[in-house]
């Protein structure tokens, strides 16, 4: 998705060897016009799969998932929570998710009534790096007996191996901007 | 907003004396069609104020803010973070926010470059109860020298005093569904 790649190059900051910061448009300040283009493109790539639910994880995936739902006939969006709110009963599916950047492990939780056997789920997240969050979300869907139809990441850091792991596990992964290398402040995209 | 009130009565669960749970459409599973109606209604009520930014706090406000931005000519959305991500520098505005339901205090943070003197801000949140989160978000805007034009909550629990406190402090508050009483499983709305 060229619009997105250009934006990453133009506005990405603090480009290290493993990190590019996209706080100005993707995960702290949000450019909703760009999100609409992202939602439309995700729909173009996944429209044929009969998706009837979108699953993401708080917080950065939520806005992308919400906007994308509009292009999928307003299918329900569910976001997994990383902490157990006092309003959530004990009746939830849980999967442990390791954060490589934070060095922490959290439990992604979805209340059981929001994932069903009949669900054909598109998993959406802002970043795909080591694939831990996506793998955890797949586990939640499968615990409920539902089907993971695909995984859409906005930005994939292919060199961190997440998409390879997910494809080895049999999942359909398609990311809008695939970064193969970050070196000396220069970002290399696939294609 | 009648559509919303009907939905709260129809799908709200675990109605106690202070709580109504709206997980099935507002803050765990999200009904994006309803969010579009909410965004349109927020625009109707706040359109005349020259708003050029929307501010919310993770996680439940994010999707509402994102969808609402579409009705405000795609003004940028910024969400305050409750934890300091490793990608956030120390250059942020912070305000402590007490959660009455969780009994915890967290720091709401926005990186300084995303709040400016020229900002005319609409603050959006899912619930307005004691008003702590909204008060903290107002503080962030004012630390930056910006203007709080209004505060829009989807559901206000008026009996918990948040809107009164905010109005005493001089803020314009307008909530889409105002609950005056929750008693014996029955919800009473204003008007």
Image (spheres, coloured by chain):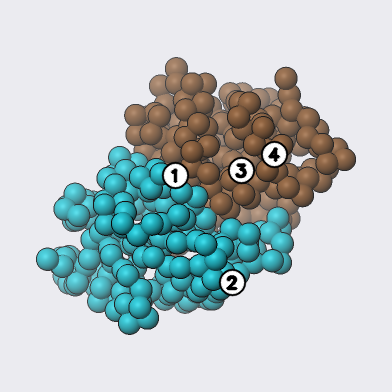
Chain colours: A cyan, B brown
Asked if labels 4 and 3 touch by Cβ distance under 8 angstroms, the answer is no
Instruction: State the count of labels.
Output: 4
Q: How far separated are the C-alphas under marks 3 and 4?
A: 27 Å
Q: Position of residue A51 (x, y in %)?
A: 41, 57
Q: Position of residue B185 (x, y in %)?
A: 83, 41
Residue at mark 2 shares a chain with residue at mark 3: no
Q: Residues within 10 Å of mark 3 (few under 14, many from 20)?
A: many
Q: Residue at x 73, y 32 (%)?
A: B179
Q: Earlier in the sequence, mark 3 or mark 4?
A: 4
Q: Position of residue A166 (x, y in %)?
A: 35, 76
Q: Quadrant of the N terminus of chain B?
A: top right
Residue labelled with disc 2: A94
Secondary structure under the numbered disc 4 in the rendered image: helix
Q: How far separated are the C-alphas under marks 1 and 2?
A: 26 Å
Q: How far separated are the C-alphas under marks 2 and 4?
A: 28 Å
Residue labelled with disc 4: B10
Q: How far separated are the C-alphas under marks 1 and 3?
A: 29 Å
Residue labelled with disc 1: A74
Residue at the top extreme, as displayed: B48
């Amino acid at each position: 998705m060229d619009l997105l790649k250009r934006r990453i190059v133009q506005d990405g900051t603090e480009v290290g060897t493993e990190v590019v910061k996209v706080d100005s448009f993707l995960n702290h300040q949000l450019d909703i016009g760009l999100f609409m283009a992202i939602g439309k493109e995700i729909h173009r790539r996944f429209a044929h799969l009969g998706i009837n639910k979108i699953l993401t994880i708080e917080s950065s995936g939520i806005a992308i998932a919400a906007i994308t739902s509009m292009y999928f006939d307003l299918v329900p969006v569910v976001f997994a929570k990383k902490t157990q709110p006092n309003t959530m009963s004990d009746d939830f599916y849980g999967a442990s998710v390791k954060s490589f950047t934070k060095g922490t492990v959290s439990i992604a939780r979805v209340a059981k009534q929001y994932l069903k056997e009949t669900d054909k789920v598109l998993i959406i997240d802002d970043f795909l790096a080591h694939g831990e969050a996506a793998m955890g979300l797949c586990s939640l869907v499968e615990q409920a007996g539902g089907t993971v139809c695909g995984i859409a990441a906005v930005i994939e850091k292919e060199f961190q191996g997440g998409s390879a792991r997910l494809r080895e596990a049999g999942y359909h992964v398609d990311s809008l901007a695939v970064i193969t290398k970050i070196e000396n402040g220069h970002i290399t995209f696939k294609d």
